[in-house]
Image: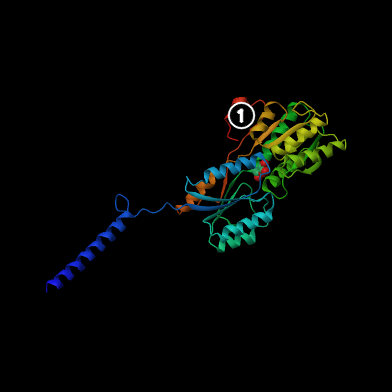
Amino acid sequence: MCKRILTASRILYSVLISLILCAALFTAGCGQNNVPVQEEKLIRVGFSQVGSESDWRMANTASMISALSEENGFELIFDNAKQRQENQLLAIRNFIQQDVDYIVLAPIAESGWDDVLQEAKEAGIPVIIVDRQIAVSDDDLYTSWVGSNFLAEGQRAVRWLEGTIRQQGRLNQPLRILHIQGTDGATAQIQRTKALDDAVRTHPGWTIVSRLKGEYTEAKAYELVRDFLATGQQIDVIYSENDNMSFGAIRALEEAGISCGTDKDVMIISFDAVRDALRQCLEGRISICVECNPLHGPRVASLIMQLEAGEIPAKLTYVDETFFSPGILSEELINEREY
Ligand code: GYE
């Protein structure tokens, strides 16, 4: 009898201990208000970047990495495609395999994305496009795009050129333009080229002496402009579709003993307005820097947060931009800029 009571109390005791242990384990996973604390889940983002061809691109990469940081709640998988579309396709397929939460694509060119984006869609991964645009058969293949209005940039440049030429009293005189283009098929190339073509069409004196494919790099533009100048052809203006190609062109011009500046041998029109280009502009070597803003990191982060909150972000978001010419610039203004 006594033995039985002893066994029963032992059972009761071990049940009690187990209950206490369970309670302790449960509350260990709770916050102050007994709400279960979950490890903050990072949002996994795969970002396929074009390359590192220009100062603009480096500033863009830095902006993306700093906005999509762990501190901000993201796990960023970054891939540099080194200016090759096939590398971008590979990167996107890798992101799909890793089942990331979002894919961000800075596309090298507009075409060639249908198949891979269809695969992302089937995997249920939203795709955000940044910087250049894409041309797809179905716009549902991407969620949202943010970047610049490249046509407006080009129009800003040719409007400035027209005004300057008019002021110089040579609006109706012949104007020989050397055009240095960016990567073929990139929106920045297509639209900046379109603005120039439209202007040439409406200005009878303007001619494009030659078109060089500078691929947005300083090295390529330097070689091409050097070889062009060696042919002895004369030019009045260089329309260069980014700052780094302008740097290459300036080097080639100076080596050939040709001066650059608004009232010099050759006028240089440049796009991006990165710090080194603004300096060259302040010094008068570049006549106009048309701004192209690369700081898309916070914009992409905010698009993702909107999607996380169940909101539908705008399909297309254009950023505001301006241009700089020597009269507008100062050392102070240049130092204040972020890129
Ligand atoms: O102008 C150039 C870069 O797509 C806007 O790409 C971008 C362009 C930019 O390499 O510097």
Looking at the image, residue 309 sits to the left or right of residue 52; the answer is left
- Residue at the extreme left of the image, as rendered: 1
- Residue at the extreme right of the image, as rendered: 232
Looking at the image, residue 115 sits to the left or right of residue 12; the answer is right
How many residues crowd around disc 1 within 10 Å: few (fewer than 14), some, or many (20 or more)? some
Name the one closer to the observer, 142 or 156. 142
Q: In the figure, 114 relative to 243: above or below?
A: below
Query: Residue drawn at (53%, 44%), measured in percent from left and top?
Result: 299
Q: Quadrant of the N terminus?
A: bottom left
Looking at the image, residue 109 sits to the left or right of residue 249; the answer is left
Name the one closer to the observer, 23 or 165. 23
Q: Quadrant of the C terminus?
A: top right
Image coords of residue 240 (percent x, y): 73, 38
Q: In the figure, 296 relative to 144: above or below?
A: above
Image coords of residue 104 (percent x, y): 57, 52
Query: Which residue is under mark 1?
Result: 334
- Residue at the extreme bottom of the image, as rendered: 1
Query: Residue drawn at (72%, 33%), measured in percent from left and top?
Result: 161
Image coords of residue 190 (percent x, y): 70, 47
The answer, for residue 16, to whether it is visible in the render is: yes
Kind of residue at badge 1: Ile
Task: Classify mark 1: helix, strand or loop.
Answer: helix
Q: In the figure, 304 relative to 17: above or below?
A: above
The answer, for residue 137, to whether it is visible in the render is: no
Name the one closer to the observer, 32 or 288. 32
Ligand 1 location (quadrant)? top right
Query: Residue drawn at (71%, 50%), measured in percent from left and top?
Result: 185
Image coords of residue 284 (percent x, y): 71, 26
- Residue at the extreme front of the image, as rendered: 3
Query: Residue drawn at (66%, 44%), measured in percent from left and top?
Result: 52
